[in-house]
Image: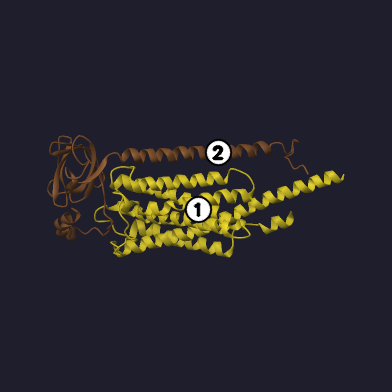
């Protein structure tokens, strides 16, 4: 028992501390740059500042769900079915849901100011909401109980299906007529229609939120490892107790 | 070996708590499925209104009178008039225009030379809108009054489709 306690003293490592520090610095710049150093947009005015949170959180939510899909595939394909992959998948989905919630909330506020409405059942908004709900479902399925292997098996199947929604969300503005504007940075013609300082702050936001994502996922998956170890320890203790009873 | 949970006073509370936790996730899953169904049904309901560009009015099947439509176009320069609680303007797309009347103030960043989606019905030659949504383009540039004044007409015609 002492060994277990010593092994899991905390979930921080030098690497996570570095990520944390980088996230603070980068997001500090996004906060200052987004609010004070970047100009108003010619059409949208100050409302454009929401973009520095909305776009990076949307991209990182996509990234998080892709990481969940890839980690789930690695768990499935791997001969050892390493639970580390399953924990990364779960942790990444949790962080992805958090970022997607931020995307929906910031997008809704942005929509109220520019479109004149908080919400419309537009293809981009609808598919994003559906993606969000899908991953909440994924997290619910993970919590349904059973052994760690059972949890990994059923959630990996869902993760591999759910990740297919991402291209649909991304290309929804091209596939259907949409109120939501088309991509600016990832536009197919490669022409980025954004002033330099705005683009710099936006990309710095992507970097900052990426590092924050890495920091959150590494901590969360280590906490999950501790929970799994605790469960295993509890079973070991129960077995030892019963053996002792049988011997008595 | 029997490894069922203990029923002694020390361990008894653990088993029901675990069961409760499981039901919490089952309830969460039920909410998720309901929410998913709601999202899809709302999307399909909204898709019932045809989405037409101004130049498709009367040309494309479904983009005619006697039904609700969503019409997309750009607010023509110098066409915007407000008063008596209503807003009128001319919407254009691909050099085709249509008169639009909306009871109220559209809100958002509604202005001339901006793309909008008007929800409503064609009555005679006028589109009677009861909802206006403002689209914004995917280009972002610093507000510059001189540059704006010079390029407004050009921008308006570019946005017109």
**Residue pushed farthest right?**
A248
Q: Is residue B111 visible?
A: no
Query: Depth check: A109 or A71 in front?
Result: A71
Residue lying at 49% horizontally and 45% vertically, measured from the top left = A136
- In the rendered structure, the answer to whether residue A239 lies left or right of residue A37 reads right
Chain the render paints yellow: A
Q: Is residue A136 visible?
A: yes
Query: Depth check: A31 or A13 in front?
Result: A13
SS for tag 1? helix
From what the image shows, is residue A74 above or below residue B28?
below
Which label is found at residue B26?
Answer: 2
- In the rendered structure, the answer to whether residue B89 lies left or right of residue A186 reads left
- In the rendered structure, the answer to whether residue A227 lies left or right of residue B43 reads right
Judging by the rendered image, the residue that carries numbered circle 1 is A160
Q: Do the residues marked 1 and 2 share a common chain?
A: no
What is the quadrant of residue A209 in the picture?
Answer: bottom left
- Image coords of residue A89 (percent x, y): 54, 54
Is the residue under label 2 in contact with that under label 1 (CB below 8 Å)?
no
From what the image shows, is residue A33 above or below residue B87?
below
Q: Tag 2: Cα neighbours inside 10 Å, few (<14), some, or many (≥20)? A: some
Chain the render paints brown: B
Q: Nearer the viewer, mark 1 or mark 2?
A: 1
- Image coords of residue B97 (percent x, y): 14, 47
Query: Depth check: B73 or A155 in front?
Result: A155
């Amino acid at each position: 028992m002492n060994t277990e306690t010593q092994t899991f003293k905390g979930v921080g490592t030098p690497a996570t501390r570095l990520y944390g520090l980088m996230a603070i610095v980068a997001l500090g710049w996004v906060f200052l740059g987004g609010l004070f150093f970047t100009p108003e947009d010619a059409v949208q005015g100050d409302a454009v500042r929401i973009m520095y949170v909305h776009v990076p959180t949307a991209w990182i939510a996509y990234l998080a769900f892709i990481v969940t899909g890839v980690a789930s595939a690695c768990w499935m394909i791997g001969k050892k079915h390493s639970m580390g992959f399953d924990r990364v998948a779960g942790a990444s989905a949790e962080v992805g849901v958090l970022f997607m919630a931020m995307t929906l909330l910031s997008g809704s506020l942005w929509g109220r100011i520019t479109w004149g409405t908080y919400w419309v059942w537009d293809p981009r908004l609808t598919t994003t909401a559906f993606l969000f709900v899908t991953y909440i479902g994924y997290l619910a399925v993970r919590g349904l109980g059973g052994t760690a292997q059972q949890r990994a098996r059923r959630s990996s199947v869902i993760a591999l299906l759910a990740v297919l929604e991402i291209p649909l969300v991304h290309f929804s503005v091209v596939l259907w007529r949409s109120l939501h504007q088309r991509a600016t940075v990832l536009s197919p013609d490669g022409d980025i229609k954004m002033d330099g300082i705005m683009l710099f702050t936006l990309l710095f936001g992507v970097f900052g939120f990426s590092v924050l994502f890495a920091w959150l996922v590494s901590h969360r998956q280590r906490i999950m490892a501790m929970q799994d170890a605790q469960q295993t320890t509890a079973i070991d203790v129960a077995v030892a107790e019963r053996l002792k009873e049988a011997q008595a | 070996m029997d490894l069922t949970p203990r029923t002694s006073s020390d361990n008894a509370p653990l088993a029901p708590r675990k069961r409760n936790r499981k039901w919490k996730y089952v309830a969460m899953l039920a909410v998720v499925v309901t929410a998913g169904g709601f999202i899809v049904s709302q999307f399909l309901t909204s898709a019932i209104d045809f989405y037409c560009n101004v130049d498709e009015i009367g040309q494309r099947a479904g983009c005619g009178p006697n039904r609700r439509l969503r019409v997309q176009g750009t607010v023509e320069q110098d066409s915007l008039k407000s008063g008596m609680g209503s807003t009128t303007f001319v919407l254009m797309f691909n050099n085709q225009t249509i008169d639009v009347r909306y009871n109220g103030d559209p809100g958002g960043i509604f202005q001339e030379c901006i793309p909008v989606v008007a929800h409503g019905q064609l009555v005679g030659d006028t589109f009677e809108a009861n909802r206006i949504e403002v689209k914004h383009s995917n280009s972002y540039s610093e507000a510059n009054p001189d540059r704006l004044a010079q390029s407004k007409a050009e921008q308006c015609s570019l946005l017109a489709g």
